[in-house]
């Protein structure tokens, strides 16, 4: 049991948790800034970036794909801003135009190109493939102390850990100006805080997180984790610090419980196969939000 | 345009001594879309005075302040703060935005909002020390809100919200205070409290500029007025500039006759 | 090949699809226009993603009752129920908690979609589930569309269009000014509900052709496109319908003209091309027109300010103003006004002086509202009025 757990379940659980944490953290600010759907838009266009990167390099490699996805996110955010300002269209509609068109373009490219030999399709982009991120070198808990075995950990784990650390550093270092400009933009500007740059920085951090998480766990989790844990946490407390901590707790709970329910739940009710872990993690986060919406102490404004 | 204050200088920035105007604006034009809301306005604020910016709705009063602070982009115009470019003098300015411009459901407490006024001193990572806490509490005490320090901001009344905003500005320890409609929608007690604080600031030698709506209190609250209706319509000490003809020019037909009569009476 | 496609010469299936896509585009465009005018475009994103669990459950239920689970009507009914549930969640979260609407939309779309994916994996594990082909509803699949499917889609589109036509007036009022609608005795909440029902209907009807991820594009893009061409709400609705229908028709025909051109994405991209062209080139609200207007306006402001400064013997601080004055021949490179510059400055100063009289005058104070610092008095006053003002001002000052 121990060996199997360490090899098959531990890595995806860790990766899922790190992805959830890395998304929930900037998500707190996105939700407070009424930019929740920026995460949604970014996650849709990531597919396009990855396909373009694949067409240019001709291979499925992590870094070119991350770069392509990040570039697509920046293009999308710029396009939304341009349509909103120059076209005088409200933010929601500008987002709707941008991410659907870019997503459609990505799907078209995918259909047109020969990707039969590689693992690249729309379903993968949406659900990810958390279950396949296993640790073949592990023979048991002792492998956690064995450098040779540790080297065989899935790359996604290292990557997610780095991205989470980056996000954490961004939020911690810029905490004060972020809070200031989120609460009172005009006052922040009057103090000389570079409000625009800060806002763009937040979106870029969210994009990097989305891109890194997307490859491992798919876009559904990304969107759900940007929004559900912070929204649920907001209903728990009136202190921003506590809200962030609650959101991290909810994200962890969603990832772990979701993974366990997806892996073992079907066996308990007598179904032969496991179900999608990404979908289940998103569902659990929704369940947490629903519970908070009816029972949390600070649910009403 | 009164020629008195149009001193021909090649540069606004003199980095000069104490007689330097705390806020000098030249040829400021601001437009929303293709409609100028502030047009070619010059303004020179007298040091140590309380100045009211008055004018009808939509006359560009708030916009003038925001453009002076770089909060909204100006089409043209130059600003000097104590004889220096704005960017070198931001620490000398405390801005009090309109109450309605923020989301009061934000998860934070009264003392946290006032602490935001110390951002200039604390920077990104500076530790909050006892003296900073002290500063927050004395600022709150000056506006009579010390008992509310730990209160959630969503639970405050309009007047209390306005006092918290003023306390945040006080915590900055600035020399120039720019307030956008500080008396809008507040109770009488708050109005009293705010005006007392502002008068005390003036007595300490600070300069106060406030966008103001209520013509009936201009005379008792302020030293100077600045009349604006897209353009500058007049400026100067109350007894010279706050005149019935000037007001009529500023407000056009929108000044009720009773108001005019009352103001004429006040003027003696 | 494309010409054949546009003339519906590519056979039975292509014609069916083009027919359905056009009806769907018309209905989606017109419905989406109201959503856009109400500034709630992205609610449709929550509605469309929320259809997935309903699709899957409908399939499972139909299989449990012995069917093959692929009846389009059955699947549509299931998706409608779950879309309605999703919509209810959005409004409950917004109304009863402090969660803002955009977060509620995002939460519902991701959670419902996630749960739908869970159900899809359940379906794959039951016998007869493997061929369910429900994945086709994510991005639409038009291959092998049945005649009855096409009829259902076209009929659905027509019903939605009729409903929009009937409700267009109250919906417009509510979109423009809900408060006013209330005073006119309109039940705003009910009309909003009716609009959401229409959005749901479009989504459900469109699942087969464009799929649930891209159906929002058919609701949003034509409306935004139409807005560039007109300022009238009723025209926005009609134009949005036409743009939507045209995109549906051209997109479906194009996708039939070559292999590997998926119908849904091609329709969306066609729609986006209309959008991009409109945003760039529309005569009044288009970006090019707006940019040109704004530059002209900026020049006007700078020139007038510069001339006034010159007229009063002040230094011109702004380098851009100085550049413009020089380019117009009003100022020499060393900053000294030229003769024409002096004339123009005197004229501008005169105009300012006239405005001052207008503003101070009791009778003309209404006209003073038109003083934006740019309009010359000649545009506002009659020649007689100007003569009278000039008489009062005395002879103009020379500069």
Image (cartoon, coloured by chain):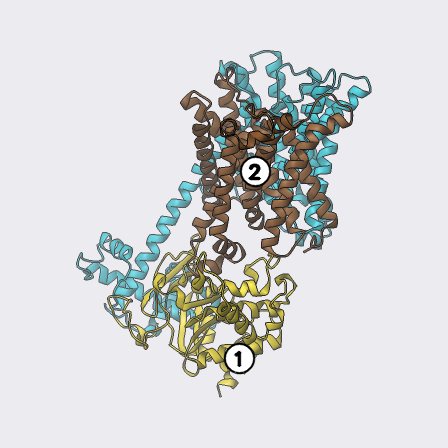
Chain colours: A brown, B yellow, C cyan
Q: Residue C369's spot in the image, x, y percent?
A: 47, 63
**Residue C223 figure quarter:** top right
Q: Which quadrant of the view contains residue C286?
A: top left
- Asked whether residue C239 appears in the rendered view, the answer is no
**Chain under disc 2:** A
Identify the image quadrant of residue B121: bottom left
Rendered position, B16 above or below C79: below
Image quadrant in which the N terminus of chain B is located: bottom left
Q: Is residue C366 above or below residue A69?
A: below
Q: Residue lying furthest right in this view?
A: C65
Q: Secondary structure at mark 1?
A: helix
Please name the residue shown 52% across and 68% down the image: B133
Q: Is residue B14 visible?
A: yes
Circle 2: element type: helix
Q: Can you identify the residue that label 1 sits on?
A: B196
Query: Could you tell whether B40 is left or right of A50 in the image?
Result: left
């Amino acid at each position: 049991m121990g060996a199997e757990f360490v090899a098959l379940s531990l890595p995806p659980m860790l990766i899922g948790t790190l992805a959830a944490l890395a998304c929930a953290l900037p998500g707190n600010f996105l939700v407070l800034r009424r930019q929740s759907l920026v995460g949604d838009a970014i996650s849709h266009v990531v597919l396009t970036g990855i396909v373009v990167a694949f067409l240019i390099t001709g291979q499925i490699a992590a870094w070119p794909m991350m770069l392509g996805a990040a570039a697509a996110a920046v293009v999308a955010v710029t396009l939304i801003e341009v349509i909103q300002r120059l076209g005088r269209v409200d933010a929601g509609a500008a987002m709707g135009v941008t991410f659907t068109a870019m997503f459609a373009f990505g799907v078209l490219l995918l259909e047109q190109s020969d990707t039969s030999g590689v693992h690249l399709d729309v379903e993968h982009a949406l659900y990810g493939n958390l279950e396949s991120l296993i640790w073949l070198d592990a023979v048991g808990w002792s492998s956690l102390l064995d450098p040779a075995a540790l080297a065989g950990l899935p790359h996604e784990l290292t990557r997610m850990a780095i991205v989470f650390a980056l996000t954490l550093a961004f939020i911690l270092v810029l905490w004060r100006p972020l809070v200031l400009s989120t609460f009172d933009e005009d006052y922040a500007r009057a103090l000389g805080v570079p409000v625009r740059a800060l806002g763009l920085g937040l979106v870029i951090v969210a994009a990097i997180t989305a891109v890194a998480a997307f490859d491992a766990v798919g876009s559904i989790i990304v969107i759900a984790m940007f929004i559900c844990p912070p929204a649920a946490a907001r209903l728990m407390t009136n202190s921003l610090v506590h809200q962030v901590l609650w959101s991290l707790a909810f994200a962890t709970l969603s990832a772990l419980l979701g993974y366990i329910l997806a892996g073992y739940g079907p066996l308990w009710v007598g179904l032969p196969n496991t179900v999608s872990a990404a979908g289940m993690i998103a569902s659990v986060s929704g369940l947490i939000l629903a519970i908070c919406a009816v029972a949390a102490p600070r649910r009403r404004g | 345009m009164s020629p008195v204050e149009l001193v021909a200088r090649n540069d606004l920035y003199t980095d000069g001594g104490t007689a330097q105007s705390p806020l000098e604006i030249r040829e400021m034009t601001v437009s929303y879309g293709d409609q100028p809301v502030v047009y070619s306005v010059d303004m020179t604020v007298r040091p140590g005075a309380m100045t009211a910016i008055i004018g009808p709705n939509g006359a560009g009063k708030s916009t003038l302040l925001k453009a002076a602070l770089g909060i909204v982009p100006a089409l043209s115009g130059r600003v000097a703060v104590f004889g220096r470019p704005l960017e070198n003098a931001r620490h000398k300015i405390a801005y009090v935005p309109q109450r309605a411009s923020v989301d009061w459901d934000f998860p934070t407490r009264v003392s946290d909002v006032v602490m935001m006024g110390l951002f200039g001193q604390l920077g990104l990572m500076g530790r909050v020390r006892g003296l900073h806490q002290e500063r927050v509490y004395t600022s709150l005490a000056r506006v009579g809100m010390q008992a509310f320090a730990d209160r959630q901001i969503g639970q405050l009344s309009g007047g209390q919200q306005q006092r918290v905003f003023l306390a945040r500005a006080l915590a900055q320890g600035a020399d120039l205070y720019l307030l956008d409609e500080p008396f809008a929608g507040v109770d009488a007690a708050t109005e009293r409290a705010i005006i007392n604080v502002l008068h005390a600031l003036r007595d300490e030698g600070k300069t106060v500029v406030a966008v103001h709506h209520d013509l009936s209190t201009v005379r008792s609250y302020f030293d100077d007025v600045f009349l604006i209706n897209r353009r500058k319509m007049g400026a100067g000490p109350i007894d010279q500039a706050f005149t019935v003809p000037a007001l009529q020019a500023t407000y056009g037909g929108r000044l009720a006759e009773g108001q005019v009569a009352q103001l004429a009476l006040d003027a003696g | 090949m494309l010409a054949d496609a546009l003339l519906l010469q590519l056979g039975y299936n292509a014609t069916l699809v083009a027919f359905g896509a056009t009806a769907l585009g018309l209905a989606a465009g017109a419905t989406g226009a109201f959503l856009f005018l109400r500034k709630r475009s992205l609610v449709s994103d929550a509605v469309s993603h929320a259809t997935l669990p309903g699709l899957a459950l409908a399939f499972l239920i139909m299989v449990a009752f012995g069917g093959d689970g692929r009846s389009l009507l059955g699947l549509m009914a299931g998706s409608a129920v779950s879309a309605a549930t999703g919509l209810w969640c959005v409004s409950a979260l917004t109304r009863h908690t402090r969660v803002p609407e955009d977060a509620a939309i995002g939460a519902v779309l991701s959670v419902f979609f996630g749960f739908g994916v869970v159900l899809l994996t359940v379906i794959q594990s039951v016998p007869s589930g493997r061929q369910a082909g429900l994945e086709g509803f994510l991005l639409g699949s038009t291959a092998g569309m049945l005649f009855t499917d096409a009829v259902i889609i076209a009929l659905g589109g027509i019903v939605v269009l009729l409903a929009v036509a009937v409700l267009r007036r109250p919906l417009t009022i509510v979109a423009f000014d809900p408060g006013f609608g209330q005073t006119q005795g309109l039940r705003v909440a009910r009309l909003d509900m009716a609009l959401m029902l229409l959005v749901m209907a479009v989504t459900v009807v469109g699942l087969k052709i464009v799929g649930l991820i891209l159906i929002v594009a058919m609701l949003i893009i034509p409306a935004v496109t139409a807005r560039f061409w007109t300022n009238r709400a009723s025209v926005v609705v009609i134009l949005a319908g036409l743009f939507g229908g045209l995109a549906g028709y051209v997109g479906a025909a194009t996708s039939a003209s070559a292999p590997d051109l998926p119908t849904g994405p091609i329709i969306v991209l066609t729609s986006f091309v209309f959008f991009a062209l409109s945003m760039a080139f529309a005569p009044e609200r288009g970006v090019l027109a707006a940019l040109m207007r704004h530059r002209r306006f900026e020049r006007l402001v700078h020139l007038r300010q510069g001339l006034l400064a010159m007229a009063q013997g002040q230094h011109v601080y702004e380098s851009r103003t100085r550049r413009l004055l020089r380019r117009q021949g009003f100022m020499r490179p060393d900053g000294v006004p030229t003769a024409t510059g002096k004339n123009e400055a005197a004229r501008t100063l005169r105009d300012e002086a006239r405005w001052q009289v207008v503003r101070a005058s009791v009778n003309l104070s209404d006209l003073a509202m038109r003083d934006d610092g740019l309009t010359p008095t000649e545009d506002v006053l009659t020649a007689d009025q100007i003569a009278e003002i000039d008489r009062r001002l005395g002879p103009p000052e020379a500069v």
